[in-house]
Image: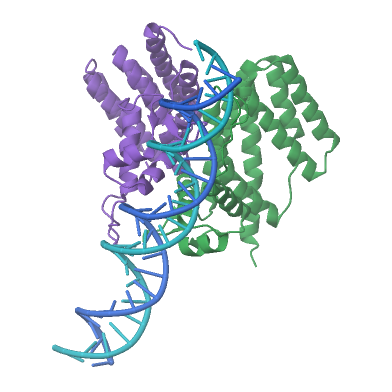
Chain colours: A purple, B green, C blue, D cyan
Amino acid sequence: MTTQPQVRPGPAPRRQSGARAVYELLRERIIAGTLAPGERLTEPLLSGSLGVSRTPLREALRLLQAEGLVDELPTGGVRVAPLNLADARRVSAVRARLEGLLTAEACERATPEDVARLHRLVDLMAAVRGHEEEVLRLGAQFHGEIERMADNAWCSALLRQIRGHVDRYRLLAARRRAGTTDHVDEHRAVAGAIGRGDPAAAEAAMRAHIERSAEMTEQALTDQTSTTP
Amino acid sequence: MTTQPQVRPGPAPRRQSGARAVYELLRERIIAGTLAPGERLTEPLLSGSLGVSRTPLREALRLLQAEGLVDELPTGGVRVAPLNLADARRVSAVRARLEGLLTAEACERATPEDVARLHRLVDLMAAVRGHEEEVLRLGAQFHGEIERMADNAWCSALLRQIRGHVDRYRLLAARRRAGTTDHVDEHRAVAGAIGRGDPAAAEAAMRAHIERSAEMTEQALTDQTSTTP
DNA sequence: CGCCCACGGGTTGTATACAAGTGCACAACG
DNA sequence: CGTTGTGCACTTGTATACAACCCGTGGGCG
């Protein structure tokens, strides 16, 4: 995430623009699948249903379009970006590199406390092995910690975009077949490499972890995807 | 009008929105430095000088903001994103990974004709060694060719954003001290690895190439800062 | 003399009005 | 009955009007 010191001492609790809220809402709905892939989105309908005018809604749609979550139709409107297996592979490959970079940079900046915190998270994951909810939450926390350690806002910004796409496929796969194996060992390998101060190994471990995760998602998708044009 | 049974796959009559034009224009100006880093941008002034109303201008600013080329001021306005050495390193690290990924994927999809084309470009670069203009142009063509071969639109989209930032630093450095050594050998290494069908080597070669290029830019920037009048 | 408050210029965010272009349906005609 | 022409409803893109908010300034007051 971008630098968000939640408690801002300054006098600027700038009013939360509705456009941002609309953007976040639509983004979540697209990722969650509430808005189905391929569904056309028209501005008057959306603005009416969300209770805002077209101006902020258009802003949100433009951002989503820049992010690739909505496609521009040849006629001019937009639709929720469709899903397909080839793109699932592509976005995961990108994510693997970006997370790998963050891991390498996190390794270079890691303090002993950081390493201890990572190991603690891995231990927690091992302790709750089997409880998917908890494992996923701790996994997200693990990656968030690395992101914080890396301190590379540009990479984080791009990663946020890519994660949105990855999550679309992940959630779609989870809906068909909830099968997240435990990645505890892979996380431990990452933490271990960081602890040893080996950025290249850390990057490789994280990249392998992401690639394995992507492989699982892909398999879940191919298992029950009957026809794909 | 005439018979038009369905949407033809040909040229879509997409009318060019002025917002896009404004976005492209501002983007180029920011990258080129015509709009100085840190400079504040106010909507009424810009809309007036560009001859469009605030609506399309706002759209452009939002896109630039999402791209990170403009910052949101705490008061609410926006300014051209400032430059600093640490961020130069960060964006280059990201670029190295993304270009590396594209190279690996290009390698996996490369046809003999593709390989021949890459080698031809490298030969051309060697032939015009010394003419910076030409070398840069051929280098861009080389990277574009790899991008096309990789066929990863998501990676390309992110890379486009990152390249914008990299170019800001590169142009800033070039303005102070034009010193692009020849990267012909590095390009040849990339083409060679692709020709051998070794994606990992190709990715590593491209990544090394980008990192070396970034190092040069960085050096030029540090030189400049130390010799600032 | 210093502090506080009110006010005005200016900026952003939002809503609405208007123009332009496109696909679709329906009806007329060969 | 198939084809074609026209009108309409709908959509997007843009411009403008309005409200909320912030900072700076100047006068009034302690």
Residue A18, compared with residue D23, is above or below; it is: above
Taking depth in this image into account, of A5 and A80 the one nearest to the observer is A80
User: Does B219 sit left or right of A206 as displayed?
Assistant: right
x and y percent of residue A88 in the render? 45, 20
Q: Nearer the viewer, residue B153 or A137?
A: B153
From the viewer's perspective, tell me whether residue A84 is left or right of residue A185: right
In the image, residue B90 sits, relative to residue B46, either above or below, namely: above
Image point 37% across, 11% down: which residue? Answer: A220
Q: Position of residue A106 (x, y in %)?
A: 43, 36
| A145, B25: nearer the viewer | B25
Residue A81: percent from left, percent from top: 43, 27
Q: The N terminus of chain A is located in which quarter?
A: top left
Image coordinates for residue B144, horizontal then vertical, percent: 67, 32
Residue A144's place in the image compared with A189, above or below, is below
**What residue is at 21 percent from the left and 20 percent from the top?**
A128
Q: Tell me: residue A111, above or below residue B28.
A: above
Residue A113 in view here: no
Residue under the point 32% across and 51% down: A17
Q: Report the label total.
A: 0
Residue A143 in view in this figure: yes
Residue B14 quadrant: top right
Residue positioned 74% across, 15% down in the render: B112
Residue A110 lies left or right of residue B147; in this view the side is: left
Which residue extends farthest right?
B127
